[in-house]
Every structure is written in structure tokens, then in C-alpha cells.
Image (cartoon, helix red, strand yellow):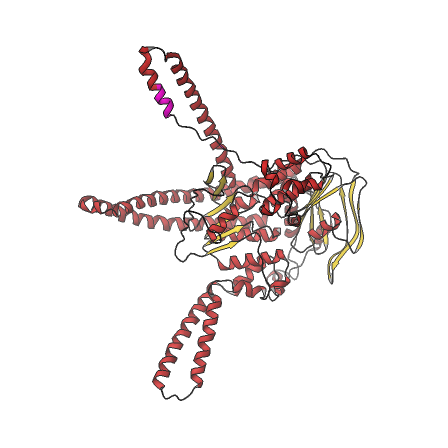
Amino acid sequence: MIFDAVALRLGPHDRIGLIGPNGSGKTTLLKIIAGQQEIDDGKVTRARGIRVGWLPQDLVIAGGKTLLDFVVSSVPGRAQIDRDLAAAEAELAAIAERGDDPDKADREQEMLELVERVTDLHERKDHFDRFFSEHEAFAILGGLGFVPTDHGRDLGEFSGGWKMRAALAALLFQRPDVLLLDEPTNHLDMPSVAWFADFLKRYDRCFILISHDREFLNEQIDRVVSLEPEGLRSYPGNYERYVEARLEEETILAGKAKNLERERERLTRFIDRFRAQANKAKAVQSRIKLLEKMEDVETFQKRHVMRFSFPPCERAVNEVIKIEGVKKAYGSHVVFPGIDLTVRRGEKIGIIGVNGAGKTTLLRMIAGELPQDAGTIKLGSGVKAGYYAQHHADTLDLSATVQEVVQRASPTAPVSRVRSLLGAFMFRGDDVDKPCKVLSGGERARVALARLLIDPGNLILMDEPTNHLDLESSESLARSLVDYDGTLVFVSHNRSLIRTLASKIWNVENGHVDIYPGTLDEYLYACAQRRKDVVVAGDGDGALARGKKTMAPAAATAAAKPVVKEDPKERKRREAEARQKRSKTLGPLEKRVADLEERITALEAAQAKRSTLLSDPEVYADDARRRTLLGEYQADQVKLEELTGRWEAAAEELEAARRRLDAEDNVAV
């Protein structure tokens, strides 16, 4: 049983984060909403004309269309209008070519009807061109990392990850009324995730988002729908607020259960003590009835979460990995012209960069999965490497059981240890005997991780380890890796994971690897400082107007030198000042918007109640009551329209203030 008596309502502007463990039914729920999955009972009701767009985690996309055509033609009805217009124009041309016709009047009437049809079709096409222009398609494709030369390429030429980006671009271009996104950032790099985050913030329609990135989820949603052990639950606010609400529920239910148990014990003691006394019979019977009527408290059901701790690993030499003069090319495309890198014992290195820069290529060469064209990659003496990649979950023996797959990775490991590890990865009881072919994508990812971690070694290489994991599992994995005392090199676009783990950043860009000995936030701040140092140089004040931008010598020198970290105290002082300024500016505006929303919500509730009463025929039997209700309804409707107008103006003012402050912050950074 996946769902039982589930009820969910989507509003036109809902921004929902759908969470739950792998295998709990998140993807199934999206399929049901999208109309891709039949249900056994109940019903799904959609508003008339509503358009639902769905981006699954995995999608097979064939070639035969250019990238741009694939995106532009994805809008429902566009292709049919083009076909109808071509047919109508061809028919009109054929009639015109017939020349003199004995039935001239009939021919003119036929031509008039066709002209009207062609005109109507042109108007409909103009509507598409206004709302679904190629300019908008260019902007979306650029934001998702495509370059102009990609627009004319056949879709079949792209890799699977870039095809998924194309599918996302087409979906965003369509602007459906309900947008269903199942781990949409899995195939995006950090710059594309940043653009996509900004796009979603501006998206004024309903969407449901499944994501393993806590920061991305918190930025986007204002409501959490959670698949809990007790059923489908809904919580207002972002993910952080959901966590707080669940903790509050646990505390309240525990207190209520404790109080009820104390009351039961008191009543039971009274009954046992005075049951045999005739003069207390009435009191005893009264308490027996009270005991029978006492409600049962639904105890808080905690969700099982993946939990794993690494055993101490064998100490390695200081230089764990030594890379010297490594070159790699695919045909004429040179990925690395020659790089030198060193990884030392205990380092946790996060590799970042745009897609196609060579992050995975670098990791695969270190892991020995891919040969380099020149140069050397040496692992230190006594270094034992374990490698996890996204595609490893797809290489599982689907006919084997979960336990068999992990046992094969370490044949000498005791069965009890294998089962204990699988229990930590949420495969308990009969779950270990499931064949891998019936597992969800996230469950297969957990099996692949367990296969690696049954014997992890003292060097772990990981490529996007949180892809296909649910949010809580990805955070649990991060906590486990924090305590790992070996060396870790990983590729990820998950900002939460990089911030939690990385003590050093490798940025892969244009065939080079820029090394930054610090956290992600410190690296991003240093990059912003370097951008700030790019000043306008040239012949006086007119250089900027003419667009002659060059890098000043000081900036070029600074870019060549090692990055100097900002003093932590100075950074904290600057950040505190920025927070105070934002709070002072935005606080009153946010309060005004919230107050107006609260008043509008109260009025809407009152209007809904009056509307229900006014639809009752009995109300019209009482003329005075009917007039009162109508008067109140009309008066509050005027108030509601006035408040809505004020709210729209306040919301626009708030958004403008936020944009202004963001721009000032960017300038300051």
C-alpha cells in the first residue's frame, strides 16, 4: 500500500516542497497529479483548461529535432496551428489559381471563409509568438548552460544530462499552470542551479518540488507536503519550519500521552481501592466510564533515516594523490592541457565547475576508470581508494537481492555485518531480500553506497553522491562523511553538501584547476572580490560609455596571486551590518504585507461562509436576514478588492526593495 485515503489540494500559487524517504511514493504522487499513473480508488479533479507540466528524474529523449525547435515546439497546440495554417494557405492558393470559375459566387464565398480562417490562425500564431517567443527560449537555454552554437544542433547529439536540461528548458518555456519537478537540479552545475533558483522565485504559478538540496528547497517553497509514517501531512513554511513543527508535534504528543497515562493510573488506583466498598459503588462506576471514554493518544511516529558511521581507517602517507602533467582530450576537444595537483592526508576536497568542464573526467582518471593521455596519477603507499559515481547505481545486478549485491563487494565480511550495514541504510527485515529491479532510483543509490562503504578504504572518491537520495538521507550521508578520518575528493552541485564537507575547493574551468584552501563561502567571496577588482580603464570617463572594459594591472596581479582570506571578524561585522540594514528596510514592508494578507484571509473566509448561506433556499424565506447577509457580503467585497489592491502595491514595493538591496549587496561584495 503506497497511499490510503490521501487528500491534497493545490492552489494556483502554491510553492510546495514534497519530501519523504526514498520509496515512500513521492514520484508516484507526481505521476498521479500529472495523469501518468492510474489510481485504485478516489478521484483527481483538475480545473478546466489547467495545464500540468512534469519533469521526471529520468527521461528518454530521441533526436530528430534541433535543440531550439524542441523547446519552441513543446508548447501544446503550436505545431497544430502551423499545420492548419499551412493547409489553409495552400487551399487558398489553389482556389486562386483556378482562375475563372462558372460558380464564381460559390468560389468567392469559399475564399472569404478561407481568408477568415487564415486570419484567425495568424492571430492565434501571433498570440503564441507574443507569449512563447524565441527570445524567451534563448534566455532559458542560456540560463541552463547552453551556448548559441547549441541551438541548431540535433538533440540526439547531446549526452543524457544535457538532454535532461533540454527537457527542463522546454518545460520552463511552456509555463504550465502546475509545474511538477522531480529532482530538477540533478543534471545542473552550480551556475545553472543559481539561474534556475532565480527563475523559480519569479514563477507565479503552482509548483511541486522534490529536492535533496536543503538550501535550494528553503529558498523556493512556502509549504511542505510530507509523506510521514502516519500518512500525508501538510505544513506551512519552508523546510526549516517543517523540522521545527515536527519537533513541536513530538513534544506535544509525548506530553499529552504522559498526562493521559498519569490520569489512567489515578483512575485505576481509585477503582482498585474502592471496588469492594458498596458506599463507593457509584463513584467507582463513574470512574470506570471515564476510563472507557478516555481517548488514545496517537504516538509520534519517527521516520527511519539512513545512519552510518565510518570505522577508523588505516593511516595513509601524507601525499595521498600526486597528479603531474596530466593531459586529456576527446578528439580535438582538449579537456586538460596539463595539470598538476596534490591531495594530502585528511583533506576533504570539493570539485566544482560548469558541466562539461571536466569534473567527472578528473575524478574518473583518479579512480582509474579512465586513462589519461599523458602525465602520471599516483596513489601514495598504503592508499586504498573507494569510488562512487552516479552511474554505479545503474550497474547493479538487477536480478540479485540487496544483500547479495553488498556481500559480493566484500565476500569475507560476516553476514551479520552486511545486514547491520544495510539496516543503517534503511533496508531492514525482508527488505534485504528484495531484487534490485523493484527498487526506486533512490533505493538503488543507497545500495550502491552500501556496496562502497562495506569496505571504504582510506580514500573515498564520490561523484554527485546525493543525487537520487532523499533530503534526510543526503544530510545523513554528509554528517557521516564529516566524521570520516580518511581523505575525501568529491564532485557536487549541492551547496549544503559542499558547505558541510569541503575544506578545500577545486574549481575546474577552461582546462585548468584553480585551488582554493578554504570553504565554499570563502571561495565565492574571494571570486566576488576579484570581480570587483575588474575596473574600467581607458581614455577618461568616456571609456565606460563606449564599453571599453579592461582588467586593471592590479586586478591582473591579484588574480595571479594566491587568494588571501578576509579577516573573519571583519567579514562577520560586514555581514551583521548588512543584516541590520535589510531588517530595518524590509521589516516594516514585510509586516505590512503580512498584515494585509491576514486581513484578506479573514475576509475571504467570512465571504465564503456568507456565500454558502446565501446559496441556501431557506435564507430567502427570511427577508430581513437575506438583506443583512447581502449587505454584509457587498460591503466586505468592496473592502476585499481595496485590500487586495493595497496588498499588490505593498508586495511590489517589498520585491523592489529586496532587488535593490540584493544589487547593493552584490556591489558591496
- Percent of width and height locating residue 421: 65, 36
Q: Which one is nearer the viewer's eye here, 339 or 242?
A: 242
Residue 621 in magenta? Answer: no
Q: Main secondary structure of the magenta part?
A: loop
Residue 229 relative to residue 592: left or right: right
Residue 566 in sight: no
- Percent of width and height locating residue 149: 63, 65
- Percent of width and height locating residue 580: 52, 40
Count all numbered tags in the image, as a single digit: 0
Residue 542 in sight: yes
Residue 295 in magenta? Answer: yes
Q: Which one is nearer the viewer's eye here, 480 or 192?
A: 480
Answer with the quarter of the image where residue 470 lies: top right
Answer with the quarter of the image where residue 293 lies: top left
Name above or below for residue 536 compared with residue 477.
Answer: below
Residue 611 relative to residue 174: left or right: left
Residue 283 relative to residue 629: left or right: right
Magenta region, residue range = 287-304
Q: Residue at x 58, y 56 (%)?
A: 164
Q: Which one is nearer the viewer's eye here, 380 or 389?
A: 389
Q: Residue at x 33, y 12 (%)?
A: 280
Residue 321 relative to residue 352: left or right: right
